Image (cartoon, helix red, strand yellow):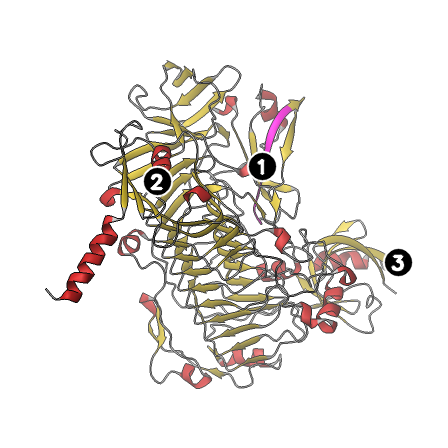
Amino acid sequence: MKFSTMLLVGFLMVGYSHAKDIYISPKGSDKNKGTMNSPFATLYRAQMEARKYKAEQVNILLRKGAYDLSRPIVFTVEDSRAQGEGLSIQGYQQETVTIKGSAKLKLNWQQKDGIYAAKVPQSGLIFDQLYLNGVLMQMARYPNYQQGKVPFNGTAADVLSEAHIKKWKAPEGAYLHAMQTAMWGGFAYQIKGKKGTKLEMEGGWQNNRPTTMHKDYRFIENIAEELDTLNEWYFDKQQQELYLKTNVNLATALIESPQMESLLEVKGSAAKPVKNITIKGITFTHALRTFMKNKEPLLRSDWTIYRKGAITIEGGEHIDIEKCVFTELGGNVLVYSNYNKQHMFSGNHIYNSGSSAVVFVGDPKAVRSASFQYSQFVYLKDMDTKFGPIGNNFPSECTVYDNLIHNIGQVEKQTAGVHISMSQNIKVSHNTIYDVPRAGININEGTWGGHNIEYNDVFNTVLETGDHGAFNSWGRDRYWHPKRAVMDSIAANRPELIFLDAMKPTLIFNNRFRCDHGWDIDLDDGSSNYIIKNNVCLNGGLKLREGFKRIVENNIMINNSFHPHVWFKNSQDVFKHNIVSAVYYPVHVVDWGKQIDSNLFPDEFSLKKVQEWKVDLNSVVGDPQFMNVEKGNYRVKEGSKAFAIGFKNFEMNFGVVSTNLIKKAKKVAIPLIVPKVWKEDTVYDFSGVKVKNLTTLAERSATGMSTETGVLVLNVDNGSLMNNTIKPNDVILQMGNYPVLTVQDLMEERKGSQSKTTVVLKVFRNQKEQEVTVKLK
């Protein structure tokens, strides 16, 4: 053996010999030595032992089985390690290891009328969820659970009827769940008692743009009188008695109840971060629901957040989580709160969770001139106009790679597979995300950009909410103002303010998106500084609403097209070298940005219609000649007219890359290509005001309406008597005392007001209803 080879082998042997292995087993004892033959029983004991070995790599190896936690595992700076001397917590040689946050219940059951009852001798136990042989039972609820029915697996409009409330003797502790009126998410209320036939409730803070609850989509749970079907349960807190309706033999059953919100926590800070910990090959399950604690408003969004997950990391660097499984968790799965840097979350499988999967959320104190409600703003004279954030107390340079995420948001509906707020340089790559109630990937505001969204496969999204996309974002940064006229003035006179927060471009490259209930890519209010390139949009097309400097090129839109909504003047937007399947769908676009040109259209009619708007003068018509539509290969063949407009073929390698995750992942439905037929809505003249029926999701989104009703104002003639009172993009809802649902309603009431010189109109403008007095003659 050569000397150099011997030296290398010796070095490797020395390196390996310096690793300290600590073993734990469900069959072990914390009085043992922590060796293979004498393992500890708990992670808590292994953690204390690991702290003795600071100058070497330490591996905590879990033998197969389930570990029931009595409290969260908390890593602090005492557990922090130098690079190369990290701490690893992992299953031993790929043995199946599960960490649970639940308590096992051993009860003496008595049966009566098909319902089992048992006294609970342990005091202080939390009864929020109940698992029977690993299967989630349902809290006694009305209406009964109907799996797959959206939203909420079944709802009923009469939940709060007098008849129901009368029969509930003691509804204290029950929960009322409801969708928000505009279907942007959900509300939850805890019942504190009742007076007569009215419930006393607190809650409804889970949406940051508060409205009334939806009149139809509601259900109530944790009601004794509603225990009427199999797999339901109820806990009588006063009597400490548990009731369960089942046909399972409870004498031998495993019954568990989650007891904690977080199973594992990292607690550090920007000044003293916890460093270099790896968690690998572990299943995490059974954490509490947290929907009643979801209160913290995020910046100018309809989102609120709770900064806890089954794993909660604050103040960490290089905390890597690999090849783990996260399932049956009641709240968020993973939350990176405040300062976090250079983490890797990879190769994991997340499913059946109550809220979001992966959440990045920074410190609002790092935001200059922060506003938290849609209607709030900071006056220019008071605005901090310095560039970027204050300090570094926010997530940055973290990666979410090769993860399978599905069936999340089972309790809360304002959720996402990956949610990013007040963060910078987050990479979301090669993930497969599907079966979610709202967006697959969501960016809450422009602070502070630099994100890289690439090679993801995101589909079956917006299943229970409305007005969103598979990818969803909004801006509403420092320059944002709730009144469009003021915002237009700011954009024109102080354009340097626009990129103070969206300081780095966000890249959306090489993804495949499909949304059948919204847009595939939805850049909403003020989303700015984006480059969107080489994406396949399978159904919902691409929307750009109010924002600046969005460069959209070389994308493919199947069975849909481009949706420009209410753009700013001089937006700097670019849309070029794209393949579209239909005419564009603009809503109140006066200025078409920097360049809308050199795109491929399916037919002459579509192109000519678009050219009426003075765009796409160099675009062409033709069959793109996709290589294999049936298999989703949308690369174009040699000779395709797409090459004439500058289109370039790109790699179509979407979603997870790990073999085991590829096998588990659902496949996206590849659509048949169906020609789109342009149908132009009838436009009416209402005393010099051009109006039409508000009928589409696009118009609803552009105006902010919660329903597709009312009369949309398209344009106001200069000579109209209403020129100074009615504005384009207003929605007329009422004339005098009469509701206006359609143009016909408006015209009929106009006839009835022939003798009047003025009339009061109720309009929806700037996201709220208001009354304006207009002249008729």
- Highlighted range, magenta: 184-193
What residue do we see at 34% from left, 51% from top? 85
Question: Which residue is found at the position 45% from the left and 34% from the top?
Answer: 145
| 640 horizontally vs 751: left or right | left
Question: Residue 260: which disc?
Answer: none
The residue where tag 2 is placed is: 50
Proximity of marks 3 and 2: CB atoms separated by less than 8 Å: no
Tag in front: 2 or 1: 2
The image shows residue 330, relative to residue 230, as above or below, that is below
Image quadrant occupied by the N terminus: bottom left
Is disc 3 in contact with disc 1, using a CB cutoff of under 8 Å? no
| Amino acid tagged 2 | Ala
Residue indicated by mark 3: 756
Front position in the image: 364 or 223: 364
Q: Which residue is mark 1?
A: 157
Residue 740 in view of the camera? no
Q: Secondary structure at mark 1?
A: loop
Give me the C-alpha separation between circle 3 and circle 2: 84 Å
Q: Position of residue 389 (x, y in %)?
A: 61, 60
Q: CA distance from mark 3 to mark 1?
A: 41 Å
